[in-house]
Amino acid sequence: MTFGNSLRITNIVLLKFAWAACVIGGTFYGGVVLAGMFLTCFLQQRWRKEYPFFVLLGLVGTALDALWVYTGVLDYGADTLALGPLPLPPLWITFLWVGLGLSIFEVLSFFLSRPILAAILFAASAPFSYLAGAQFDAVVINSNVALLAISGAWLIVFYTLFRIANRVNKSEQQPSEPAGEDAGADSLANASEMTRSA
């Protein structure tokens, strides 16, 4: 097994453990798993490509969960943070969103060219994710009907996310013509023009 394959497997394992570490273990254990995901991202040299996505997804995901807390849909109890009068979700919620952002071009790369499928699957899994968290007393769901709104939000977020990520991935895979070839072609065209003029 090569070093690259080992890192890929490590990232898959860390993503699978991320949910349990954050929901059951809280911020500390979630932070440990997230640190491991950052390390594999750095060693695989995916850092520059992925940092806009995990930063954006961390901010958007935290904002969405803050909205659900503010409207009373979700209640994280003593883990709830605050920014002035605005209630915020626990830090481990942000860790979960960032962890997903760190996996877009690796574990979740299958969905890059399938944004609709990704959006449907993530939207369908959203209620179950929160319901499972409620089973571990990590969150209280005050309105099961409102889980449909969360699914709708996830549908939009992940469809947009994978559409943008796919464009970025395609743009990096397109080979650029060497400058020397362009210069050579221009010189040949100019020589042909001069010959015809003569």
Image: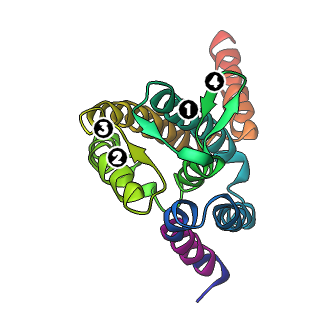
Per the model, the C-alpha gap separating discs 3 and 4 is: 21 Å
In the picture, residue 116 is in which quadrant?
top left
Residue 191, horizontal then vertical, whole percent: 71, 24
- Mark 3 and mark 4 residues within 8 Å of each other at the beta carbon: no
Q: Of circles 3 and 4, which is in front?
A: 4
C-alpha span from label 1 to label 3: 17 Å
User: What stretch of residues is rendered in magenta?
Assistant: 6-16
Q: Earlier in the sequence, mark 2 or mark 3?
A: 2
The residue to which callout 3 is attached is 147
Residue type at numbered disc 1: Val
Instruction: Indicate left or right for 70 with 58 as reference.
Output: left
Q: Which mark is residue 60?
A: 1
Q: Marks 1 and 2, how far apart in space?
A: 15 Å
Marks 1 and 4 sit apart, C-alpha to C-alpha, by: 16 Å
Q: Are marks 1 and 4 in contact (CB under 8 Å)?
A: no
What residue do we see at 72% from left, 63% from top?
35
The Cα–Cα distance between marks 2 and 3, rounded to whole angstroms, is 8 Å
State the SS at label 3.
helix
Give 63 or 52, whichever is nearer the viewer: 63
Q: Is residue 154 magenta?
A: no
**Location of mark 2 (residue):** 126
Q: Do the residues bearing badges 2 and 3 touch, measured as CB atoms within 8 Å?
A: yes
Label 2 – label 4 distance at C-alpha = 24 Å
Say which of marks 1 and 4 sits in front: 4
Look at the numbered disc 1 and give the secondary structure of its residue. Answer: helix
Q: Amino acid at mark 4?
A: Leu
Q: Is label 2 or label 3 in front?
A: 3
The chief SS type of the magenta part is helix
Secondary structure of the residue carrying tag 2 is helix
What amino acid is at disc 3? Leu
